Image (cartoon, coloured by chain):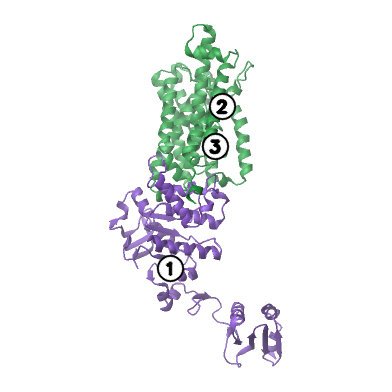
Chain colours: A green, B purple
Amino acid sequence: MTTAIHRPAPRRHQVLFALIGLGLAGLALLSLCLGSLHVTPLQVFQALTGGESIDPVHHQIIVDFRLPQVLTALLAGAALGTAGLLMQTVFRNPLADPFVLGVNSGASLGVALLLLALGPSGLSLTDGLTGSGQLLRILASSGGAAATLFIVLILSRRVDIMSVLIIGLMISYTIGALVSILMFFSMAERLQSFINWSFGDYGNVSWEQMPYFLPTIAGGILLSALFIKPLDALLLGERYAESVGTRTKQVRFFVLLGASLLAGTVTGFCGPIGFLGIAAPHLCRNLFQTNQHRVLFPASILVGALLSVGADLLARGPGLDFVLPLNAITALVGAPVIIAVLVRQRQLKRLF
Amino acid sequence: MATEAPLSAKQLSIGYRQGADAFALASGLNCSLHSGQLVCLLGPNGAGKSTLIRTLAGMQPPLSGELLLDGRPLQDIAPRERARAISVVLTEGLPMGVMDSYALVSLGRHPYSGWFGGLNAHDCERIEWALHAVGASTLARRQVAELSDGERQKISIARALAQEARLMLLDEPTAFLDLPRRVELMGILRNLAQREKLALLLSTHDLDLALRFADKLWLLSPEGSLIQGAPEVLALNGQFAEAFACENLDWDAHSGSFRTHPEPCLRVQLSGDGLERLWTQRALDRMGFGLTESTSDAAFALKVDPDCWQLELADGAIRVLDTLQAFIEWIEADEWRASLSA
């Protein structure tokens, strides 16, 4: 009997992790190669290792434009996948994600306020911010995200799983309205820059912003990773979680702090990007057939990054002269995934 | 019987607070749970059974009074240490999504495992033992969502068992189960209490099973007092009947169960013996007939022999039926009422 039950982490999980990792590496490489100017993987390699033989134009395109964009896509996807997973577990709601719960809107309010405040000094949203300006942006968007998340959390204690989603949507609309009013009083070029930002674009983060973007995302992920075990316990509901010794209030606070930091920072730098946060954890649950966070957490990071780099590649439309709004691509890919999962599982609560 | 009492309450008052107001459901409770004993908590809906269980588990603060775990105040004990002493099975649902039974039961090891929840050999051993103890070893790799209510309840109990706590508090573990499953579960729990020297408290609405399986009953009355004693003693001295007294329900001390229709309007003079008589009497009970010894106040006389139900009606007519089914149909057809007016 004992040997029949006991089974170490299934080999299938290892294979899946390896495949997803390879897929991610492949897509990232493809992303570096394709664009308005195609380069070969060899040239990419030379550019990255600082080879002498490469054309300086190619070097500049690869290292100064494509590399930060791919890196941003990777980090943003990882962050959104993680944030989605954290929110789904804390809210015990399979459809919770930064977009649905209004966290993106909260972050955008923070950004809009910042924009309005900095407006007279002639700074645009994405360029020319000083170091303190970058930090200010992280603070503004994460703060907006956190405020929204904790409001939704407080309200969600009184209502059921479906109402939380509707409350999140309503908060999104309310904040959206506030942002519109703020924008109404903004200058025309600020308005355009805000609209561009709201389409979502990983190109916003250049090497100048990277020293702020990367550590914040990494910090948010590391902070959340500390709570992998209590997150498992939270799957049972708060009462059961407490009965196995989990300090649920603390855990919830720090996990949502991590989620706000991740979702807020991505929104602040790249715009509100929908559906990755929902889609990545769901794909992982289906692929790995488990709800345990020590599997889902790294899986959501990888799958989030994979979806994100893929969406970015599609948005930039290799061989085309224009760039599609990233948000449109994530919605086109993400929404059908969610519908398919829902239809297949029939019952919302069975997803979780 | 074991005498060690890991958990005891003195002058405990339970209920809930709303703002500055406290609403007490029961107060002045003095009780303790002993190792090796299965205690069944009975009481009408709304008496506060769930609240008492949550309070004893330390999940809800008492309004007043003292709650001691091994002689130390329960609220002073850190969550992790408390979780090693007290496990619970609650009425709220388990996660339904993609999670197999083994993973669910392994959550019971959280009070022991390290920061990231890795399981060592002892943890795995304990999980397998818990699954085996509730007879659910074969369910280990099944998804929780695919299990039946009874199987899920077993897994839920296995999860609590994996916690290796000396106390287990269960809130209505037999609700939603069919009778054979309820009996099986109660048997499992009683065995666990005796073999593993666990102190078990479970709330239930199943009076009959509680009488048969419990070492001790706690009756929580709507007035908020707690009556304690061996089930047989409470049944005999009438306290059991008192706690559940209501208009249409009568305690039958002979069968140890509650019966409806305490005042039958029609009586039957029943004779005969064997199983046929027993089940005929049950059928008459159900249809609202009482029994009588004399022919004078009987609606009809019935003599039951194997394969023969002989009826003598008030007007002297005799009928012979050969099955219980035929007898019940005859009663339901109501033709015999005509003989009463005659």
- Of discs 1 and 3, which sits in the foreground? 3
Tell me if label 1 and label 3 are in contact, CB under 8 Å.
no
Give the vertical position of B342 relative to A12 (above or below): below
Q: Which residue has dot 2 on it?
A: A23
Left/right placement of residue A341 relative to residue A251 reads right
For the point 64% across and 85% down, the residue is B305
Q: Which mark is residue B214?
A: 1
Which of B166 and B169 lies nearest the eye of the viewer? B166
Residue at left offset 31%, top offset 66%: B3
Task: Report how many numbered discs are placed on residues in the image.
Answer: 3
Report helix, strand or loop for mark 3. Answer: helix
**Which residue position is annotated with label 3?**
A12
Identify whether B91 is placed above or below B307: above
Amino acid residing under circle 3 = Arg
Q: Nearer the viewer, mark 2 or mark 3?
A: 3
Calculate the distance from the C-alpha at mark 2 to the C-alpha at mark 3: 16 Å
- Identify residue type, mark 1: Ala
Q: Is residue B327 left or right of residue A20?
A: right
SS at circle 2: helix
x and y percentages locating residue B193 in the rendered image? 41, 62
Q: In this orientation, does residue B247 appear? A: no
Mark 2 touches mark 3? (CB < 8 Å): no
- Residue A274 seen by the camera: yes
